[in-house]
Image (cartoon, helix red, strand yellow):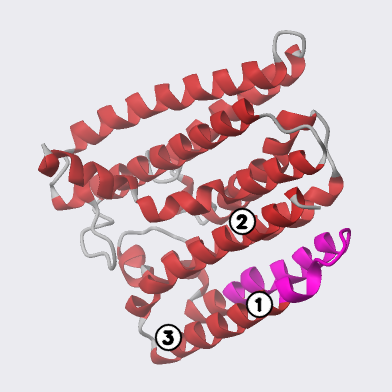
Amino acid sequence: MKNKIKPWIQAARLRTLPLSISGILVGSAYAYYQHTFEWIIFVLALFTTLSFQILSNFANDYGDGIKGTDANRIGEKRLVASGEITSTQMKKAIIINSVVAFVLAVALIYFAFGQENFVYSVTFLVLGIASIAAAIKYTVGNNAYGYSGFGDVFVFIFFGLVAVVGSNFLYSQSIDLKLFLPATAIGMLSTAVLNLNNMRDIENDRIANKNTLVVKFGLKFGLWYQRVLVFLPIILYLLFLNNFKNGPLGFSILFFYLAISHNKTITKIVEKNSPNEFDPLLKTVALTTFFFAILLSLKLITT
């Protein structure tokens, strides 16, 4: 039984899950600050987001696996490519997970808006369906957007703007423009994780015709792009925290130190032209994003 479950745990890519809930934590913490927080919405939002992320990971494993993209990849093995999970089994899992994600999304919408806010309910239902479609279409199908360099855009939108501003709207039913600052920061840091992944896989993706931005423009572009994705969020966090007492300094010094360290590491890797060394950084950046989401959330709920 254990041997049957283990491949599915690997396919779920547990190390990506903290990153996926970072935006939900910040949006929910800001709702607490606004005195609109509700536990049922928070719990359902977390489960819905996790189901979307696992769905995306399954679909990515399936899409890249059947196209041969994962045949010689670096880093965590992919289960369809390795044969531990068949493409048929993974396809069934994607369908089941899609249904679960949809049911969770409907429950979340119901508890957030009830029956009296029909327009909001329909809007978020469409957004939920779009999230499911985006999770699947990243690598699945002939027109998978991950193969055309649009993966960065979708990660930025769904991990950043939708996760933070969208989750907060579930509580407050309003949009606070200040929230676009941390939303943009988290979206950029999430995109930084994807960019590292694409820098690592540049040679394999090029062979498989997976035209990520790094494949299109090269590793040096990826390096400068990564710098923007990592350093600009510091300014955005500073601007956001400037609205609160005793917030910016210690928070930003630590973040800046980590960003400098990250920049030195990726610069050395690019100069050595050793993309395989990017793999350990994926977990570091994802957990750093999660760590700062927690710090920011604690700041908001204790203000």
Say the numbered circle drawn on residue 254.
1
Tell me which amino acid carries mark 1: Leu
Residue 161 appears in the figure? no
Q: What element carries label 2?
A: helix
On the image, numbered disc 2 is attached to which residue?
294
Position of residue 5 in the picture relative to residue 129 (left or right)? left
Q: Are marks 2 and 3 in contact (CB under 8 Å)?
A: no
Rendered residue at 67%/37% (across/down): 167
Residue positioned most to the front: 302
* Location of residue 126 with respect to 87 vertically, above or below: above
Q: Mark 3 points at which residue?
A: 269
Question: Is residue 157 placed above or below 130 in the rendered structure?
Answer: below
Asked if labels 1 and 2 touch by Cβ distance under 8 angstroms, the answer is: no
Badge 3, how many Cα within 10 Å: few under 14, some, many 20+?
some
Q: Picture coordinates of residue 277 (x, y %)?
A: 35, 79
At label 2, counting other C-alpha atoms closer than 10 Å, the crowd grade (few under 14, some 14-19, many 20 or more) is: some
**Amino acid, disc 2:** Ile
Instruction: State the separation of the CA atoms marked 1 and 3.
Output: 23 Å
Q: Which mark is residue 4?
A: none
Whether 214 is drawn above or below 19: the answer is below
Q: Is residue 303 left or right of residue 68?
A: right
Residue appearing at x 54%, y 79% in the figure: 223
